[in-house]
Image: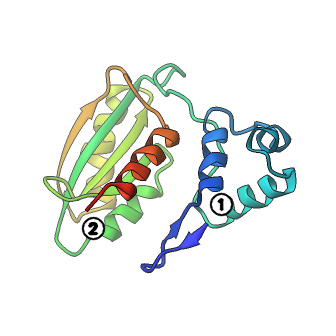
Amino acid sequence: MTYRMDGLMKLDRLDQEILIALENDGRRPYRDIARDLDVAEATIRTRVNRLIDAGLVHITAVGDPLKLGVDVVAISLIRVTPGHIQKVADVLARYPNVRFVGTSFGSADIIIQTLHPDIQSLHRFVSQTLPRDAPSITSTETFQLAEVVKSTWDWKTWFEQQAEVDTSPA
């Protein structure tokens, strides 16, 4: 892992290979990864811990909410009063049913993904809870997911694509 001029971190090839090895099974033994990458197990352990400590990687279980019995999964596009985006995003991030909060450009200032036990709960959340707790919200547009067609964290493809960009002639 190296630091770029802008202060962000750039993964080196070994870090990328470790991340690729963990993407399908975050519980994969370090000794197996070390054997596959032809490095010491301690190197893998050190590198993974460094990635975790730096906040670059979180090893967790990822489930499909619709297949796990969540009846309503929604994506909401939220507009807020200028100057209040971060404050509203922080409020939204505190809700336990909010799975994702991101600020954006374009027609929405904030995009969230939420889970609900039923459609009435989603309606109460959008029509009552949000206006009460985040009065700087000026409008919302909400979409209920019917099916998740793709949800992946395919880092190998991403790293390969970036390597092609980095080596292409200017």
Q: Which residue is mark 1?
A: 51
Looking at the image, is 11 positioned above or below residue 95?
below
Which image quadrant: the N terminus?
A: bottom right
Residue 31 rendering spot, x and y as whole percentages: 85, 42
Which image quadrant: the C terminus?
A: bottom left
Residue 7 rendering spot, x and y as whole percentages: 48, 78
Tell me the amino acid under the disc marked 2.
Answer: Ile
Direction from residue 14 to residue 35 in the image, left or right: right
In the image, 28 versus 130, the foreground residue is: 28
Q: Residue 118's quadrant in the figure? A: top left
- The tally of labels here is 2
First-in-chain label (1 vs 2)? 1
At x 66% / y 40%, what residue is drawn? 22
Looking at the image, is 111 positioned above or below residue 166?
above
Residue 107 rendering spot, x and y as whole percentages: 13, 53
Q: Nearer the viewer, mark 1 or mark 2?
A: 1
Q: Which residue is mark 2?
A: 85
